[in-house]
Amino acid sequence: MSNEIRAERPLIVGPINPEHPFPVTLEGTVVKGYGRGSKELGIPTANLSEDATATICSELKTGVYYGWVQLGERDTQVYQMVMSIGWNPYYHNEKRSAEVHIINEFPEDFYGEAMRVVILGYIRPEQNYPSLDALIKDIHTDIEVAKHSLSRPKYDELRSHEVFGLKQ
């Protein structure tokens, strides 16, 4: 796939208001993944436990999604996120994974922390890539798509979804 085609992706996806099946909520614990997000891609991910992954994989098709995420205690900061659900064909995974890239920089890992996710929309299907650079470029585009898509009023309102336990 050429860079020209990928550069033409729209930066806002989905309808003006979230539609069925969204929002989809998910709760789990952050576990160690394959260790590729930070090391190889420079895009760290928080991986969900196998139980949480099995739940979400039965509800949604494989691909890349966007929404909101909260770590640790309820009533704490909520961040934008982009999430990959699937097999990661570039790496030939033998089991599905649910990997959340939180659009924020953290000084340290947070393995074992509770994580609550509100998935609000679908960005694109899972795919294979001819190179690591092509994969990285597409993930960076996914991040921009998530930021722009979440900036719409009805999506931004869901930053205070009840799963996060935010006090009004």
Image (cartoon, rainbow, N blue to C red):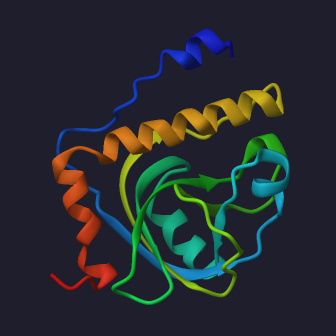
Farthest-out residue, front: 107
Picture layout, residue 21 above or below residue 32: above
Task: Give residue 4's position: percent from left, percent from top.
Answer: 60, 9
Where does the C terminus fall, quadrant-wise? bottom left
Residue at image position (32%, 48%) is 150
Residue at image position (59%, 71%) is 53
Which of 151 and 20 lies nearest the eye of the viewer? 151
Position of 102 with respect to 129 (left or right) is: left
Where does the N terminus fall, quadrant-wise? top right
Residue at image position (66%, 61%) is 45
Residue at image position (29%, 62%) is 23
Task: Give residue 138's position: percent from left, percent from top.
Answer: 62, 32
How many numbered callouts? 0
Position of 7 with respect to 148 (left or right) is: right
Task: Give residue 41's position: percent from left, percent from top.
Answer: 77, 46
Picture layout, residue 161 above or below residue 99: below
Q: Is residue 124 visible?
A: no
Q: Is residue 29 visible?
A: yes
Task: Give residue 30's position: percent from left, percent from top.
Answer: 63, 79
Residue 135: quarter of image: top right
Picture layout, residue 63 above or below residue 118: above
